[in-house]
Amino acid sequence: MSEAMGHAAEARRVIETDVADVQLDGDGVPSQVNGYRVLKQLGEGTFSKVYLCEDGQGSTYALKILNKSFLKRKREYKKVDGKMVFSNAFQKVQKEVAIMKKLAHTNLVKLHEVIDSPADDKLFLVLELITGGQVMEWDDRAFRYRCPRNPRGVLDVDEVRRCLFDVVHALDYLHQNQICHRDIKPENILIAAGGTYKLADFGVAHMLDDSEKKTMRNTEGTYHFLAPECTTGEEYDPCQVDIWALGVTTYALLLGTLPFGTKAASLSDVMDSIRVDALALPDDVDPECSVLMKMMMTKDPKLRATAEQLKQVPWLAGARDGRAVTSASVEVSKEEIEAAFTPASGATAPGTRDAASTPSSPVKSNRAFSALTNHETIKSGACLLM
């Protein structure tokens, strides 16, 4: 049986509630949301704030609060298949929530509850609390990644091996279920209890329809992690772009730097470097890890390894020695995306419904090119999706 079909995983249920009882403290900060007691703020993104919260049984979660009207006002235009298409952050969150409702995999951040409150125009996402934070943090001033847990500032090769094992399994699960992540990078890999690595942030993820070719033309993600085929304007396989980005991520985990475009003065220079420059690896890099990076960062996407092939590499396959990886299949319809939560101007009758769930920096490519700034910070393991 394939990983996407089960490993005896049970269907996960995401609680969906369409009324919110929010209590504020003297400073106007939420102190209680329905049955969750808010303990402290963990982090803040462009469109959201994330808090540590606790339910009545003492279980802790990350509570992410978003303003739906603000999301709808944040508009962007991008070229899709040669045409300019309008979208907004609200639509991205709709898609992200719809996908996360269905995800069930050991190495993906889980969504526990969606509290949609039309009355005060807020969306509350109760997420799995990941206490270890990001695997690495971006240092704008030094223009490099750093690992605060290691005096050398980078990961040891054994930790890189375990991290890759977890993320490759997560990616293979996504790809088998026709989901491409589109923003693989160290900031989106979180460390859970027991040293498990979890892939987070589905803000630019895409689920291919059965009738859809497994190709895309529009570009999302983070510039320095884009694959060569994304720099030409031609169609590309988004799953193979994920593999390239994981190769760039592996390079950053081991060395702290990026393999391409680090001396670029413009976006064009970054793209040229990705497309033309050869991958240069120091002589002291672990030889088996070096082979793996070359498999992931092969310029020709048709020759690049797939997630399924990476899982079979002996050096990677032996990283976890018997640890179970659980998952279940995914299917997200257009109707489910549109119904992920109530539109900003909509209203529904209050109540709670229990929805079955079968499987929850360097600059972004949809932003103007500038210095690598404005990385979102996660003080503790909250998943800042936006």
Image (cartoon, rainbow, N blue to C red):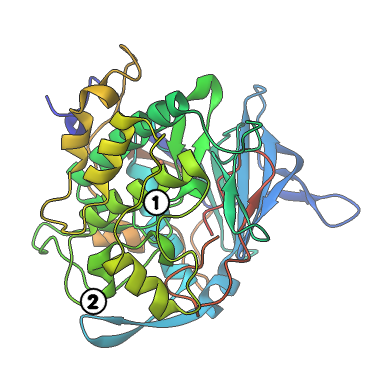
Q: Is residue 361 left or right of residue 81?
A: right
Q: Position of residue 84 (x, y in %)?
A: 31, 88
Element type at marker 2? loop
Can you say which quadrant of the picture contains the N terminus? top left
Q: Residues within 10 Å of mark 1 (few under 14, many from 20)?
A: many
The residue tagged 1 is 184
Q: Is residue 148 left or right of residue 77?
A: right
Residue situated furthest front in the rendering: 283
Which label is found at residue 321?
none
Q: Position of residue 245 (x, y in %)?
A: 34, 53
Residue occupying the point 67% across, 23% down: 58
**Where is 320 relative to 52, above or below?**
above
* Disc nearer the start of the sequence (1/2): 1
**Where is 25 relative to 59, above or below?**
below
Q: Position of residue 365 (x, y in %)?
A: 42, 71
Element type at marker 1? loop
Q: Amino acid at mark 1?
A: Ile
**Where is 350 relative to 324, above or below?**
below
Residue 67 in view of the camera: yes
Classify residue 361 by image quadrant: bottom right
The residue tagged 2 is 232
Residue 222 in view of the camera: no
Residue occupying the point 29% across, 52% down: 244
Residue occupying the point 54% across, 71% down: 71
From the image, state whether disc 1 or disc 2 is nearer to you. Answer: 2
